[in-house]
Structures are given as structure tokens and as C-alpha cells.
Amino acid sequence: MAMSDTIVLGGGMCGLAAGMMLARDGHRVTVLERDPAPVPGSPEEAWERWGRGGVAQFRQAHFMQARGRLVLEAELPDVQQALAAAGALRLDPVARMPTSIADRDPRPGDERLVTWTARRPTLEQVFARAAESQDGMEVRRGVSVSGLETRRIGRRLHVTGVRDDRGQQLTADLVVDAMGRRSALPKLLTDAGGDPVHEEAEDCGFLYYTRFFRSRDGSLPVPRGAYLSHVGSFSIATLPADAERGRSPCSSRHGTGRSSACATRPPGRRSCARVRSTRTGSTACRSPRSCRWAA
């Protein structure tokens, strides 16, 4: 069977994982990533200096969905081992069920819910370093896609490649869209003469604020509650992060229209998503009812 040429649009975790899995099946893979910054040499460098504007919530609290961990175990076990070596922690939500649940005996299938947690820059850096050493796969950073190469078969539009922002044409048997929720693919398809892509989207109205804490001796604190706690108008997620650094993120989620004035976003007013300074952000999260439009 002849192996195909595949182009993956987007060099985040999903795009790189898809590319590595295709390459290991013998396909020739090219990944195009818009962000130009090279991959840092360590998770700490990624946290401090890696510019990844194309990744939403790059420095917010993060953990993998359990299904992602199962795919890693089956398809990319070396990447999973690299995550563990970088300090990622296994997270078992069943182990910290709410105290209101009386039946705490383990049940068959509970192990499927175990997953990995780490800072998002750590996860991205581990995947990116693995992709760099993958045979049959090339990652081109700082490359945007300006258009699609297409041909018609009957009434159907078939994508045969892409044009990058430098005018270079790249042909492929398969083009994979891994550009995330802000993907430009619907517009690119329409511009190429394809039918409009039906999309339904709604602003969830949530704002996120995250702080990471590191203990003086590098150890993680003893958990005092559930991973997710509801406190008035806030939902607070507390997760362990990279183990060797003893970090724990605390992420507050604010809902539009609730009692926290800092959380609502009336027309024409800036939201507290713009809060960046530690002092102002800390005040906003400590005193949500008295903090109006801290940004």
C-alpha cells in the first residue's frame, strides 16, 4: 500500500499527536504551526519564555481528559513516559470524591478515569520535543496557511493541499485541521468555493484566573478538598502540577451575570480577563464582591 503525504494544520498537542501517529503508520507528515518560537529545552524554559499565542489558556490550570491518557498508552507510550519524566502527575478523580458520597468502594472501570495533570507549557513542550525526533515527520514553525488547493470531482470539492503565507504550494493526500476552536478552515473552505460550514457557537460567559503556588521544599501540599469546589459565585479548581517543582494551580471560574461584579461583562466595559498584574489579580479574586471592573 502506497503511503500518503499528510499536512497537519496546527502544532498543538492534538496536531502533534495526530502527526506522530500517522508517521508511525508510515505516512509522510508535515505539520504547519503559526507560532514561530522554537521549542524550549525544558518545561521551566517553556513556562518562563515560550510564546504560544495560538494556544488558548496556555498558562492556565490544565489536565488531560482521561480518554487522552488512554490514547497515549496505546499509541504513544514514549510520550507518556516523557510526561512522567517531566514531572507530570497521575490524577485519579475517584480518589477524591465528595465526602457526601458514602459508597467509596472501587468499581470495575474506575481505572479508565485516571489521567495526567501538569502545566500546559510542560505538556506542550514534551509533545513538541517528541515530534522533533519523530522519523517521517517535519514540523514547520512560523508558517500560516493563506489558502487551500482544491479540485472538483463531480459536485464535490476535494482539498489537495494548501498555500502558505509565503505563497508556497504544498500538496497532500490528506489535510488535517488541528487549529482548535479558532480554526480558519471554515473560511478557507468557503474562499475556495466550498459550501459554507455549519457551525453553532455560544459564548459560555466564563472568565478564568489562575495562580500557581510552589512550596519552599518542593513538596506538594496535602489535599484539603475536592478538585472542584463551588464557593458562592466562583468555582475553584485546585490541581497538582509538575511534581518536581511542587506546583499547584488554583483556578477561579467566574460566570456572567452572577453576583460577582468582577465577573459580569456589560456592553462596552472591559472584562477582568484583562487583569494581568499579580497585585490587581489577587485583589480581584480575594474580594470579588467589592471589585468592580478591576481591569
Image (tube, rainbow, N blue to C red):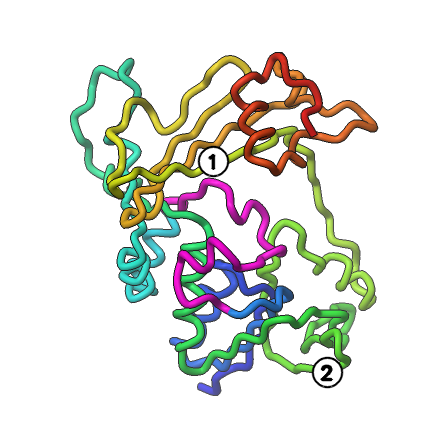
Up the image or down, 7 lies above or below 56; here it is below
Q: Could you classify mark 2 by the number of other residues whose Cα lies within 10 Å: few (under 14), some (14-19), or many (20 or more)?
A: few
Q: Which residues are magenta?
A: 39-66
In the image: residue 34, left or right of residue 187:
left
Q: In the rendering, which numbered label is found on residue 211?
A: 1
For the residue marked with disc 2, what is the amino acid?
Answer: Gln
Q: Nearer the viewer, residue 22 or 11?
A: 11
Up the image or down, 274 lies above or below 225; here it is below
Magenta highlight on residue 45 = yes
Q: Secondary structure at mark 2?
A: loop
Magenta highlight on residue 156 = no
In the image: residue 142, left or right of residue 102:
right
Residue at 58%, 75% in the rendered image:
140
Q: Nearer the viewer, residue 98 or 42?
A: 42
Q: Look at the image and tell me in which quarter the N terminus lies.
A: bottom left
Residue 150 seen in render: no
Residue 253 position, x and y percent, is 54, 28
First reached walking from the N terminus: tag 2 or tag 1: 2
Up the image or down, 264 lies above or below 69; here it is above
Residue highlighted by disc 2? 168
Residue 175 position, x and y percent, is 61, 71
